[in-house]
Image: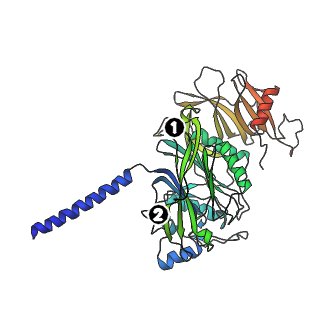
């Protein structure tokens, strides 16, 4: 009898050890995808009632259905607050959820939440700030209007949120725009890949509009590698634009809407190529019944092929990335200038910053024909000599692991909207500046006039305007959009 009990106990021990080892192996194994992105999540209204009354978890049936990934993200379409905040008058639908429900999101395996959408300000700025604070305290990362950076399997990933639908405060982003172009440029100078979560399109429309396609093309042209669309609440088709994957609408993931098309959502399971620009995405879907928020199924869409968005551009031949960055957290919606701490890109541990937090619009390498390995043009928010804040291009050298300020002159006419590093036909770098009409070099100097471009050459100790027709034409082409649309 004792021998039999020992055998049973041994069998139980071996089974438990085997299960623990297999679980550990699954946890330690390399994820199949870099990111799995789901659609809209709203844990208020009838979903909140079902969670509270029936003690359900919307993801309770999906534990073993998820494809493995380093990032699992959804669009959180609600304010998170535990206070009785008042809905703003312009909130046609006022969506809210208690902070305790973020634990359900965390337990479902989500690592990130996209917060930039038309419901983020339903309860005003206080609700918006509380949402970000609760998400952060729940150890979830947010995707919002401020660039975020992280490293995944050797790739430095940047994320950015954009909302094109007016919120309760009447605020919305606009593209094409100089500010978003600058953020994308900054992201691609500090990271290998850029993921954009965007709120756009027409509700309940199952196809992408021509406007969505044109905006997607613009975002890809600026540098986006993966675009994740939300707002229509139904699935819209996905496609490749050059090397980038565009999911125009992932539809609903967890919501209480009753239309049949809103009860099925798409999931984008994507992995970036390492040896070239491009991405591969496998389509999954989730579904629920019309009477419950509990997801019944999550599976690979067998009738749809994976997206294979490829570029023949060898990633190893791309311009070297010299710096990486850590963003400084902020909740100010109006602040479109990222404040970052800069690090050497080769410093994986990121133990010592190259600089204090710097308010930046862009970073570009520039060759000034001088005997220093690396020169960088940083477009910073600084105070000119007249003590008014404005964008200024500053030149730094990167030597011995440190940034050295080399030029902070005022040769470029103020005020400036943007500055780009360009290369002429002879292979020499120069600057193209986009000035406001009221800049002192403007011919009209009309406050409401159109912005204009000027080229600048490095002349031993600083930049001087170069009015040659060839450079002027190149600068005009570089700024194809001249102002916020």
Residue 358 in view here: no
Disc 1 crowd, CA 10 A, few/some/many (<14, 14-19, 20+): few
Q: Nearer the viewer, residue 377 or 62?
A: 62
Image quarter of residue 85: bottom right
Disc 2 crowd, CA 10 A, few/some/many (<14, 14-19, 20+): some
Judge from the rendering whether residue 20 lies leftward or rightward of residue 200; answer left or right.
Answer: left
Which numbered mark, 1 or 2, is in the foreground of this view?
A: 1
Residue reaching furthest to the front:
303
**Where 55 sits versus 457, above or below?**
below
Q: Nearer the viewer, residue 162 or 298?
A: 298
* Residue 103, percent from left and from top: 48, 65
Q: Secondary structure at mark 2?
A: loop
* Residue 220, percent from left and from top: 66, 45
> Residue 108 shows which numbered tag?
2
> Residue 382 shows which numbered tag?
none
Q: Secondary structure at mark 1?
A: loop
Q: Nearer the viewer, residue 400 or 274?
A: 274
Residue 185 in view here: yes
What residue is disc 1 on? 275
Image quarter of residue 390: top right
Judge from the rendering whether residue 174 lies leftward or rightward of residue 84; answer left or right.
Answer: right
Q: Nearer the viewer, residue 216 or 207?
A: 207
* Residue 265, percent from left and from top: 57, 64
**Where 262 sits versus 139, above or below?**
below
**Where 470 sits versus 482, above or below?**
above
**Where 378 sits versus 126, above or below?**
above
Q: Tell me the quadrant of the picture where the N terminus can be found.
A: bottom left
Q: How is the image coloured?
A: rainbow
């Amino acid at each position: 009898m004792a021998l039999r009990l020992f055998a049973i106990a041994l069998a139980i021990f071996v089974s438990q050890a085997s299960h623990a080892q297999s679980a550990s192996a699954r946890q330690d194994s390399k994820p199949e995808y870099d990111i799995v992105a789901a659609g809209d999540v709203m844990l208020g209204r009838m979903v909140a009632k079902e969670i509270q009354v029936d003690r359900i978890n919307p993801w309770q049936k999906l534990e073993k259905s998820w494809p493995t990934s380093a990032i699992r993200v959804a669009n959180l379409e609600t304010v998170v607050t535990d206070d009785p905040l008042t809905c703003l008058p312009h909130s046609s639908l006022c969506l809210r959820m208690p902070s305790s429900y973020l634990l359900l999101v965390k337990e479902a395996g989500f690592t990130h939440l996209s917060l930039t959408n038309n419901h983020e300000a339903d309860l005003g700025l206080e609700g918006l700030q509380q949402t970000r604070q609760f998400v952060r305290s729940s150890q979830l990362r947010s995707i919002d209007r401020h660039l975020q950076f992280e490293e995944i399997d050797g790739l430095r990933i940047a994320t950015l949120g954009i909302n094109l639908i007016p919120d309760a405060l009447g605020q919305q982003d606009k593209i094409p725009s100089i500010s978003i172009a600058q953020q994308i440029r900054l992201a691609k100078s500090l990271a290998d890949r850029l993921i954009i979560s965007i709120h756009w399109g027409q509700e309940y429309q199952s196809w992408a509009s021509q406007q969505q396609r044109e905006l997607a093309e613009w975002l890809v042209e600026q540098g986006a590698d993966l675009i994740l669309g939300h707002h229509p609440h139904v699935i819209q088709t996905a496609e490749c634009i050059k090397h980038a994957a565009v999911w125009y609408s992932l539809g609903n993931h967890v919501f209480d809407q009753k239309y049949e098309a809103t009860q099925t959502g798409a999931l984008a399971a994507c992995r970036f190529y390492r040896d070239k620009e491009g991405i591969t995405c496998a389509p999954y879907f989730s579904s629920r019944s019309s009477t419950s928020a509990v997801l019944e199924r999550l599976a690979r869409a067998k009738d749809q092929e994976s997206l294979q968005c490829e570029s023949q551009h060898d990633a190893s031949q791309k311009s070297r990335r010299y710096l990486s960055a850590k963003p400084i957290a902020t909740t100010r919606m109006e602040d479109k200038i990222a404040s970052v701490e800069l690090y050497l890109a080769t410093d994986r541990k990121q133990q010592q910053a190259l600089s204090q937090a710097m308010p930046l619009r862009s970073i570009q390498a520039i060759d000034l024909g001088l005997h220093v390995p690396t020169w960088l043009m940083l477009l910073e928010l600084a105070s000119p000599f007249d003590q008014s804040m404005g964008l200024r291009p500053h030149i730094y050298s990167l030597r011995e692991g440190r940034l050295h300020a080399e030029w902070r002159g005022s040769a470029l006419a103020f005020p400036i909207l943007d500055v780009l590093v360009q290369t002429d036909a002879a292979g020499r770098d120069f600057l193209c500046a986009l000035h406001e009409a009221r800049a002192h070099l403007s011919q009209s100097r009309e406050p409401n006039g159109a912005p204009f471009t000027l080229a600048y050459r490095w002349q031993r100790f600083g930049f001087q305007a170069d009015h040659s027709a060839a450079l002027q034409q190149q600068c005009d082409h570089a700024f194809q959009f001249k102002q916020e649309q």
